Amino acid sequence: MYPAMGCHEYHELATKIYEAIKMEHTDGMYYDQLAEKAPTDEARQIIKNMARDEHCHAHTLEMVYKELTGMNPPPEPQPPQVGEYTEALRPRLKAETDAVEFYRELYLATHNYYLRDIFFRIMNDEIEHALRLIYLLTF
């Protein structure tokens, strides 16, 4: 399914996808908890949608990881600690923009259209999350 890659490229891609799975699981759990602290129904729904996206990203990447390596993906990490609502939003903005860069690098590093499409869609979701966080921080 994947074009021929050197051993180093293959290992590096598998390692980055492994990291991404853990990151997406953690982010999804973070947003699940944060939604419970949201001050309005609108904010809660926005955050729940972001959590759903992160869980979907993790699931998609788990399938890719298994296809790529033949191994099961990492188990879900421990749930993160979420502070007070407004203070919990602030670090997420940086995390989402860092995720955009992470997926942009993966997108540009692979020539496989199947993987590029996955990385591109996740990158766009992360951009949307950053914009939604800015919105939540302004009201």
Image (cartoon, grey):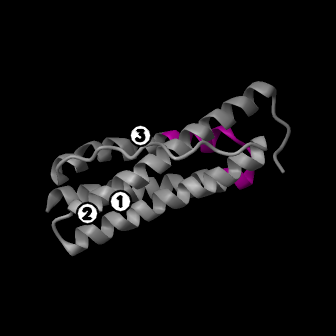
Quarter of image, res 13: top right
**Looking at numbered disc 3 in the image, what kind of residue is underneath it?**
Asp
Q: CA distance from mark 3 to mark 1?
A: 20 Å
Look at discs 2 and 3 and give the one toward the viewer: 2
Would you identify the image quadrant in which residue 132 lies?
bottom left
Q: Given contact means CB atoms under 8 Å apart, are the residues at marks 2 and 3 in contact?
A: no
Q: Quadrant of residue 60?
A: bottom right
Magenta stretch secondary structure, dominant: helix
Q: Residues within 10 Å of mark 1 (few under 14, many from 20)?
A: many
Answer left or right for 105 relative to 79. Answer: right
Q: Residue furthest top?
A: 8
- Contact, mark 3 vs mark 1 (Cβ under 8 Å): no
Q: Is residue 123 left or right of residue 50?
A: right
Mark 2 vs mark 1, CA separation in Å: 7 Å
Q: Name the foreground residue: 74 vs 8.
A: 74
- Between marks 3 and 1 in the image, the one whose residue lies nearer the viewer: 1
Q: CA distance from mark 2 to mark 3?
A: 25 Å
**For the C terminus, which image quadrant?**
bottom left
Q: Circle 2 is placed at which residue position? A: 36
Identify the residue position indicated by label 3 in the image.
98
Image vertical order of residue 136 relative to residue 16, above or below: below
Q: Secondary structure at mark 3?
A: helix
Tell me the residue at 84%/51% (across/down).
Answer: 1
The reply to whether the magenta stretch includes residue 114 is yes
Residue type of the residue flagged with mark 1: Asp
**Are the residues flagged by discs 2 and 1 in contact, CB closer than 8 Å?**
yes
Where does the magenta region start and end? 102-115
Q: Give the camera-side residue of 124 and 23.
A: 23
Q: Is tag 2's residue or tag 3's residue first in the polypeptide sequence?
A: 2
**Residue designated by label 1:** 32
